[in-house]
Image (cartoon, rainbow, N blue to C red):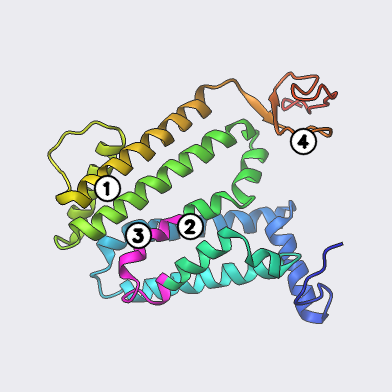
Amino acid sequence: MAHDNNIHPHDGRLGSLRNRLRLLYNGRTPEATRFQLAVIIIDVAILAFFIATPVLQESATFLWLDYAVALLLAGDITARLLASNNITRQLRQPTVWVDIFILLTLLFPATLANLGFLRILRLWSLSRTGFLWRALHRLGLNEWRASTHAVINLLTFLFIVTGFVYTFFFRSQGGGEAYVDALYFTVATVTTTGFGDIVLPGVWGKLTSIVTMIIGISLFVRLAQSIFKPNKVLFPCPQCALQRHDLDAVHCKACGHSLKIPDPGG
């Protein structure tokens, strides 16, 4: 049995707090559902702030918003660590590293200004938590999990490339129009439309375009596959742990073990 290397889960008030956080983050009670929905809404607002940063960063209130988001993110990271059964193991997770890096860019917005476009990785980090998938399961949309993953991966890539292009090629122009130009270039390149009215100068610009096209095409293909491939259901086989099966499967295709997949229609 694994034990927390830092704090025993029942040590007084802190233990009670950790148990409370576990119920809120991982529970399925109405209270936990409301809490998880509130977290999702806050995270969507934070992501909107990250996307709008190039437009907002010249405003007088930008630093206040930046530090407010840093406070929210720090609270979320701390709460998730306390809610975990093993803090040390949780700290080794790549999603935690990503969130800590994003927190640093918020705490030092001037020093790490050129890396601010990587904040959108928070979207990828969120897709690795159980919030979104539990919501889909409750709505009876579990079969859309693979498609949702593919959409999130594509959006994350689009906004990372847009932020990179804006930071290193369009930032001198400043403002929202320059960011829209960066987004326009990214979408035109990823879709291989290639209108040619906006191009990146120099060798580095060409290399950026090449990498964007290669990765973008791969993500589009992955999205198309997840949408048009036959519907599957997530149900781990007790024998070989194969995760995905046909909706009407009676036996596992990998090992032949009998399956008892619940009827989604009740």
Mark before the other along the chain sequence, 3 or 2 = 3
Residue topped by disc 1: 208
Mark before the other along the chain sequence, 2 or 1 = 2
Residue topped by disc 2: 122
Residue 261 visible, this orientation:
yes
Q: Secondary structure at mark 4?
A: loop
Look at 71% across and 64% down and name the residue there: 84
Tell me, yes or no, whether the two marked residues, 3 and 2, touch with CB atoms within 8 Å.
Answer: no
Residue flagged by tag 1: what amino acid is it?
Thr
Tell me, yes or no, whether the two marked residues, 2 and 4, touch with CB atoms within 8 Å.
Answer: no
Indicate the position of residue 170 as horizontal and vertical percent values. 18, 56
Range of residues picked out in magenta = 105-121
Residue topped by disc 4: 241
C-alpha gap between disc 2 and disc 4: 29 Å
Residue flagged by tag 2: what amino acid is it?
Arg
Tell me, yes or no, whether the two marked residues, 1 and 3, touch with CB atoms within 8 Å.
Answer: no
Position above or below: 260 against 145: above
Name the dominant secondary structure of the magenta segment. Answer: helix
- Mark number, residue 117: 3
C-alpha gap between disc 1 and disc 3: 15 Å
Residue flagged by tag 3: what amino acid is it?
Phe
Mark before the other along the chain sequence, 2 or 4 = 2
C-alpha gap between disc 3 and disc 2: 11 Å
Residue flagged by tag 4: what amino acid is it?
Ala
Tell me, yes or no, whether the two marked residues, 4 and 3, touch with CB atoms within 8 Å.
Answer: no
Q: Residues within 10 Å of mark 3 (few under 14, many from 20)?
A: many
Does the magenta segment cover residue 109?
yes
